[in-house]
Amino acid sequence: MKLLKTLDSKFFHAEIPAKPMGKYAHFITIRITESYPLFQTDGELNKARVSAGIQDKQLISRLAMFKRKQSTPERLTGRELLRNYKIGDWEKCDYNVDFSKTTPDCILYGFAIGDSGSEKSKVVVDTAYSITPFDDSHLNFTLNAPFENGTMSRQGEVTSRINSQDHILPQTFFPSIVTLKDPTESGFLYVFNNILRTRHYGAQTTRTGRVRNELIGVIFADGEIVSNLRWTQKIYDLMKDAGKINPPDPLNEDDVWNYANQAITEMMQQECIRHDDFIGRSFEPLLAEVKAIASDETQLQAMLTQANIESTAYAQKHILKSSEKSKKGKKATAATE
């Protein structure tokens, strides 16, 4: 079923292949913090010591948004939609507990259930890094837990429920490339929609962690492209040369957008793979069409249904049958012992 009018069908498979076939869809994304999120491990914000830019070799610490911090909220967004519209084996699926093995989430984002089987993720997400240094991108807050009357003391006793925590500042930018291997049209739309819809990342997502995803393009290629770190360093070089980095002031979003476009365009010219780039104006019709599908209930359900049909067919052919054969083999072995 044809879902997109703005893209040629040559970019997609008719069905999900069992083996890697060399088709890649890269979602070129800028993640922008809009509150005070926490991307942390063991109580500390994740960071990395790296070169500021490709040309600027000065070492700086950058905030790091690990891959799980990105992919988990996005796949949960997709699972929520499948449950909302009761598409596929949504009742059985319980994230990190019991996977149905047949939904678009299971097949595209992968799963592992011990001896019961596994599926490697077709959605590749790598660690994203802040454009600005760690020192200019975070702030330490003192946190408290008051009593019912709103104060920190009661009957002469002062509570010890007080702590401090580093938070990431609003308007901190994380360039991130999300890659979908061997996409079908509905699978491409499923992942695209998840990126657009997801609004919270990191710890304490019910109270903070607001992040907006701005896609600046999509690149179809026959291989993987530049890393998040190198793209971020290129953006930093361009913005610093233009005098657009002025700490402690946050970066201007329009400047980030323009230099991110320039950076990815220049870097793709140096790649040794075949690629079709939809960036800038060439990306606008595709983005508008995807948003129209995502905001129309009938079209959205049709896309989700098609994605589930394809993922279920893949599961029946390549996962469930092999799982049954494995179980039969174990029973036969046990019977002969």
Image (tube, rainbow, N blue to C red):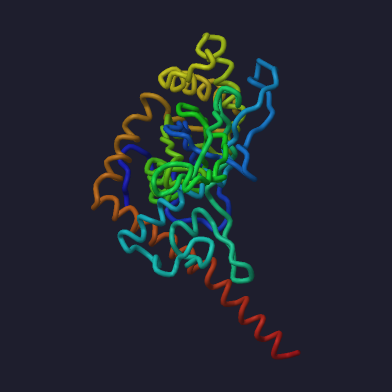
Q: In which quarter of the image is residue 79?
A: bottom left
Q: Is residue 39 left or right of residue 191?
A: right
Q: Residue furthest front?
A: 156
Q: Which residue is drawn at 44% across and 62% down?
A: 103
Total of numbered circles in the picture? 0
Q: Where is residue 133 in the image (x, y as percent from the top left)?
A: 60, 23
Can the viewer see residue 57?
A: yes
Residue at x 60% of width, y 77% of height: 325
Pinpoint residue 282: horizontal percent, then vertical percent.
37, 27
Query: At x 48% / y 20%, what residue is drawn?
Result: 250
Q: Nearer the viewer, residue 198 or 12?
A: 198
Question: Which quadrant is home to the C terminus?
Answer: bottom right
| Above or below for 99 versus 36 | below
Residue projecting furthest to the right? 337
| Front one among 254 and 315 | 254
Q: In this view, does 135 lie above or below 239?
A: below
Residue 10: % across, % down = 43, 43
312 horizontally vs 321: left or right: left
Residue 217 appears left or right of 289: right
x, y (%) of residue 147? 44, 48
Image quarter of residue 271: top right
Q: Which of 135 and 286 is in front in this view?
A: 135
Residue 196: quadrant of the picture: top left
Q: Is residue 22 visible?
A: no
- Above or below, 300 relative to 326: above
